[in-house]
């Protein structure tokens, strides 16, 4: 929680410092134009990457798989979009890093691994939880779960 507080306090100060320095070096109007240009380029890239992630998630769902990595990438893309729309060079740099597929997939993989260790995550066809590492498979290789109740013969005839 302290880290978030520090980010919300320190990040705007760092961004203002950099904007002032760059503005003094190349001029205020060029600095404003540069910030707007990075936002437009970022949003264009975000739209393309977001649509591709949506298509990949749709394909996985059609094949019966859970699109865990695509959902993580979607969250990362949303964060990237917010960072790219925030004026500043540090936020733009982080936003563009999140738009890079390799960096984004690496972060998603790290988050999923951490969640698997914490418990309660489905990865592929295996369910991991903090209570048990892997659900045991039956002889047929499939686990069938359900509720049951005992039925008397008189209940079946009715």
Image: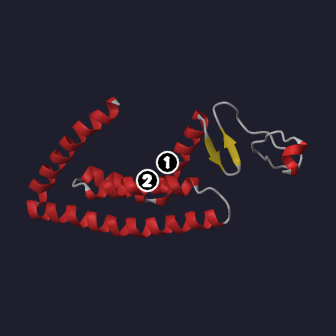
Task: Name the disc covering residue 47, or none.
Answer: none
Q: Residues within 10 Å of mark 1 (few under 14, many from 20)?
A: some
Q: Residue at x 73, y 38 (%)?
A: 134
Judge whether residue 97 can be spotted in this image.
no
Residue tagged by mark 1?
107
Q: Position of residue 70 (x, y in %)?
A: 53, 58
SS at mark 1 in the image: helix
Task: Name the disc covering residue 76, or none.
Answer: 2
Compared with residue 59, is residue 123 higher up or lower down, i.e. above or below?
above
Q: Position of residue 85 (x, y in %)?
A: 27, 58
Whichever of labels 2 and 1 marks the residue nearer the N terminus, that label is 2
Q: Residue at x 35, y 70 (%)?
A: 44
Which quadrant holds residue 13?
Answer: top left
Q: Position of residue 100 (x, y in %)?
A: 44, 59
Q: Residues within 10 Å of mark 2 (few under 14, many from 20)?
A: many
Judge whether residue 123 can be spotted in this image.
yes
Q: Are marks 2 and 1 in contact (CB under 8 Å)?
A: yes
* Distance between mark 2 and mark 1 Cα atoms: 9 Å
SS at mark 2 in the image: helix
Horizontally, residue 97 falls left or right of residue 124, namely: left
- The number of numbered badges drawn on the structure is 2
Q: Quadrant of the N terminus?
A: top left
Horizontally, residue 151 falls left or right of residue 22, namely: right
Q: Residue at x 68, y 61 (%)?
A: 64
Q: Position of residue 18 (x, y in %)?
A: 18, 48
Which quadrant holds residue 87?
Answer: bottom left
């Amino acid at each position: 929680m302290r880290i978030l507080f520090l980010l919300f306090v320190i990040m705007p100060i760092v961004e203002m410092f950099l904007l002032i320095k760059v503005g003094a070096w190349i001029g205020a109007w060029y600095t404003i134009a540069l910030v707007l240009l990075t936002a437009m380029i970022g949003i264009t890239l975000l739209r393309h990457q977001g649509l591709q992630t949506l298509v990949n998630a749709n394909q996985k769902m059609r094949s019966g798989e859970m699109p865990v990595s695509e959902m993580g990438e979607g969250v990362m893309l949303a964060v990237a979009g917010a960072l790219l729309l925030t004026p500043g060079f540090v936020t733009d740099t982080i936003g563009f890093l999140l738009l890079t597929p390799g960096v984004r997939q690496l972060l998603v993989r790290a988050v999923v691994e951490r969640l698997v260790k914490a418990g309660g995550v489905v990865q592929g066809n295996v369910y991991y939880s903090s209570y048990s590492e892997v659900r045991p498979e039956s002889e047929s290789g499939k686990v069938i779960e359900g509720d049951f109740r005992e039925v008397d013969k008189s209940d079946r005839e009715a």
